[in-house]
Amino acid sequence: MPQFMDVHHGMKGITAEGLREAHNADLAIEKDEGVHFERAWADPESGTVYCLSAAPSAEAVQRIHERTGHAPDEIHPVPLSI
Amino acid sequence: MPQFMDVHHGMKGITAEGLREAHNADLAIEKDEGVHFERAWADPESGTVYCLSAAPSAEAVQRIHERTGHAPDEIHPVPLSI
């Protein structure tokens, strides 16, 4: 399954609880689109959040994130990884 | 140890071999700064590369990447992760 890195800006002040809640909301419905959100990293100071997922398409990632109220600003396929 | 996500733009057309070589170059000298580059993901189409590291500071990450010829465009501390 292809992997994607999506990026959210404007999340200044995000807390560990906020990140966990957002991630759990995605996990709860991700199967509807065949997506799995694997990891997430957040920088509360700049308000940047990165999510790594395995998904059939960028559109599938977008739809899950939209339904949980946090559409990403960028979604990049990352076919290469180490 | 704090974690950092650094981002490189302008890497259009990067190959699996190119990513591996760049990563190995970082691994070869990372101990000089107490850094460890854990993962890397690349989108050859947009030319974006993400590197996840554990490091004492963003400056330490910057110095290793500069010495290996690929200074990042952004380095974000990511104190929150899932």
Image: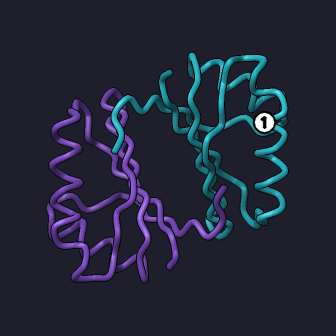
Chain colours: A purple, B cyan
Say which residue appears at 68% left-offset and 26% top-offset: B62
SS assignment at label 1: helix
| Label 1 sits on residue | B26
- Disc 1 residue crowd, few under 14, some 14–19, many 20+, Cα 10 Å: many
Say which residue appears at 16% left-offset and 67% top-offset: A28
| Residue A19 placement, left or right of B2 | left
Q: Is residue A1 above or below residue B34?
A: below
Q: Where residue A59 sits in the image (x, y, percent)?
A: 36, 79
The quadrant where residue B68 appears: top right
Q: Where residue B43 sits in the image (x, y, percent)?
A: 62, 64
Q: Is residue B82 above or below residue B18?
A: above
| Residue A77 placement, left or right of A24 | right
Q: Is residue A35 above or below residue A39?
A: below
Say which residue appears at 37% left-offset and 49% top-offset: A40
Q: Where residue A37 sits in the image (x, y, percent)?
A: 34, 63
Q: Where residue B23 sits in the image (x, y, percent)?
A: 76, 45
Q: Depth check: A35 or A63 in front? A: A35
Say which residue appears at 26% left-offset and 33% top-offset: A12
